[in-house]
Amino acid sequence: MKVTIFSTTTCPYCKMLKDYLDEKHISYSEKKVDDDEVARSEMLGLSGGFMGVPFTAVAKDDGTNDVVVGFDKARLDTILGL
């Protein structure tokens, strides 16, 4: 499973999300959309044009993909099997 967080430098909910995933020992990569035009374009493509952060993309080993808008613990727990 590959977890990618699209965030901004000043987003408090992004920090809460990263802290939560660290606490649960879930590895992730982070892409800062306020500093990286390529990351911003990637997020826009995955989100259908939505620019809110945090935006989390989860690519599962079975080939399915899920996305989470905002810091939604219940949805993350379901997707990640926690």
Image (cartoon, rainbow, N blue to C red):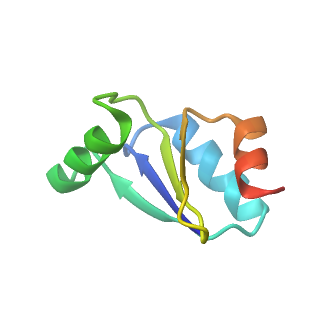
Instruction: Give how far across and how far down residue 78 sits, in percent.
Output: 78, 46
Q: Say which quadrant the N terminus sits in.
A: bottom right
Instruction: Give how far across and how far down residue 69 sits, in percent.
Output: 52, 33
Instruction: Give how far across and how far down residue 16 sits, in percent.
Output: 64, 43
Near-viewer residue (75 or 11): 75
Near-viewer residue (61 or 5): 61
Q: Residue furthest right?
A: 82
Describe residue 12's horizontal placement relative to residue 42 as left or right: right
Q: Residue furthest left?
A: 37
Q: Is residue 22 above or below residue 42?
A: below
Q: Residue at x 55, y 57 (%)?
A: 64
Describe residue 41's horizontal placement relative to residue 62 as left or right: left
Q: Residue 7, located in which quarter of the rendered image?
A: top left
Q: How many marks?
A: 0
Instruction: Give how far across and how far down residue 28 sits, in percent.
Output: 55, 66
Near-viewer residue (12 or 37): 37
Q: Residue at x 55, y 32 (%)?
A: 70
Q: Is residue 39 above or below residue 69?
A: below
Q: Residue at x 61, y 68 (%)?
A: 62
Q: Say which quadrant the C terminus sits in.
A: bottom right
Q: Is residue 26 above or below residue 50?
A: below
Q: Residue at x 67, y 54 (%)?
A: 19
